Amino acid sequence: MNQDLPDRQLSETVDIPPSVKRAIGKSSMDRVFRQKLLAEPAGVLKAEGLELPDGVKVRVIEDTDKLMHLVIPFHLELDGELSDANLDKVSGGGRTIPTAKGQYS
């Protein structure tokens, strides 16, 4: 893999659904919402518009002033094989990203 990719290109490799961004933003400003998100993440994200595939679990973890979590997203090349349809999509150099519905775009 090329180690010299521009920061902008690197930042575009991870796709965070708008509903998740909204929930993170709300949790930083609303203590009650934050506690609910920590207690019932799947239900809260669903209420924010995220459609989770059957069998997908959500775990929310909270950073502190002494502990920072770094979550590395699922990586298709390392964690699974591409179907022929998805392989066709990336053959031009693009990358597929799992969507909230478990499909790949």
Image: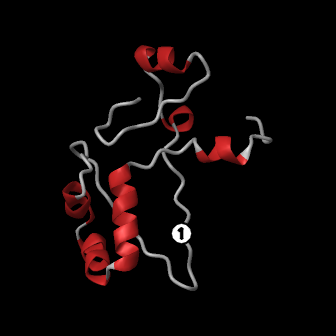
Task: Report x, y in % for residue 56.
Answer: 28, 48
* Image quadrant containing the C terminus: top left
Determine which quarter of the picture holds residue 42.
bottom left
47 with respect to 9 (left or right): left
The quadrant of the rendering that contains the N terminus is top right
Residue found at x 56% / y 85%: 65
Q: Which residue is mark 1?
A: 69
Q: Is residue 5 above or below residue 58?
A: above
Residue at figure coordinates x 44%, y 20% from the top left: 86
Above-or-below relation of 15 to 27: above
What secondary structure is marked by label 1?
Answer: loop
In this rendering, position of residue 69 left or right of residue 56: right
* x, y percent for residue 44: 23, 63
Is any part of residue 60 visible from this angle? no
Q: Position of residue 57 (x, y in %)?
A: 29, 54
Seen at 56% across and 37% down, the residue is: 78
Task: Determine which quarter of the picture holds residue 20.
Answer: bottom left
Q: Residues within 10 Å of mark 1 (few under 14, many from 20)?
A: few
Residue 85, how many percent across, how many down?
A: 41, 15
- Would you place residue 2 above or below residue 72 in this image? above
Colour scheme used in the picture? Answer: secondary structure
Amino acid found under the numbered disc labelled 1: His
Identify the residue at horizontal 21%, vertical 43% (top origin). Answer: 54
| Residue 38 in sight here | yes
